[in-house]
Amino acid sequence: MYGIINKSIEELVIEKFGAPIWEAVLLKSGVGKQIFLSNEAYDDAVTYQLAAATADVVGIGIEVVLLEFGKWWILHTCQKRYGSMLKTGGGNLTEFLMGLPSFHDRVQLMYPKLSPPQFKIERIVDQHYKVHYYSKRPALQEFMRGVLFGLAIYFNVDAKVELMQSRNQGFDFEIFEISWS
Ligand code: HEM
């Protein structure tokens, strides 16, 4: 994945736990001391190793790391660095979700080697949607759930996000339900 993802994990860990903990995470991950370049593509394994090492060093579950990272990704990294892109994604959560299937098409203009997730949105009733999530990468479900929470916070709504089906249960893709009042 592009280095911006690893850089975002680094910023999250430093902000919440401090620079010495980040040094310990780099060491533990086996990735070693390095500066991540936003526009360079890194092996996916680097991101997984950083998330796993954060969980180990801090003493929390990797699901918690991925969930918090998803929120951080939207509320810090994307809002700070790609604010205008988020704005053009929609004026409220419903509009944003409707545009989600094509959202990474725009990201791809900036990151040509992107291997983005794909989405399909199904309306159940207003303010209650199914989000079909297709990814070639395993084990990022909690990251995705965190991203949806982050979007809800970004749009100032108190949303419930539930994982309804998963590849872990033998399905081909994940379905989340997101609802708010
Ligand atoms: C300005 C906003 C955004 C930017 C710049 C962005 C960019 C990226 C980048 C660079 C990656 C790494 C993929 C790669 O390098 O091949 C990625 C992955 C991902 N993005 Fe986005 N993204 C944005 C918003 C979103 C939103 C709104 C969602 C979902 C609601 C989302 C869901 C994901 C997921 C789940 C992945 C993990 C990869 C996978 O599942 O295969 N992103 N994104």
Image: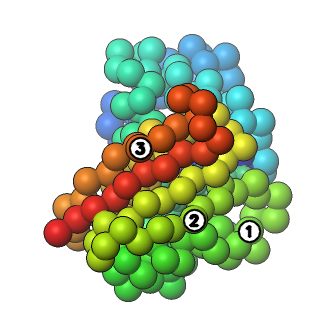
**Rendered view: 158 above or below 136:** below
Residue type, label 3: Met
Camera-side residue of 103 and 167: 167
Q: Badge 1 is on which residue?
A: 108
Q: Quadrant of residue 80?
A: bottom left
Is residue 22 among the parts visible in the rendering?
Answer: yes
Q: Is residue 129 left or right of residue 9?
A: left
Quarter of the displayed picture in which ligand 1 can be seen: bottom right
Q: CA distance from mark 2 to mark 1?
A: 18 Å
Residue drawn 48% across the image and 59% down it: 131
Q: Badge 3 is on which residue?
A: 164
Residue drawn 37% across the image and 77% down it: 94
Q: Residue 110 in the image: x percent, y percent?
A: 73, 70
Question: What label sits on residue 157 in the rendered view?
Answer: none
Helix, strand or loop at label 3? It is strand
Q: Residue 74 in the image: x percent, y percent?
A: 43, 59
Question: What label sits on residue 120 in the rendered view?
Answer: 2
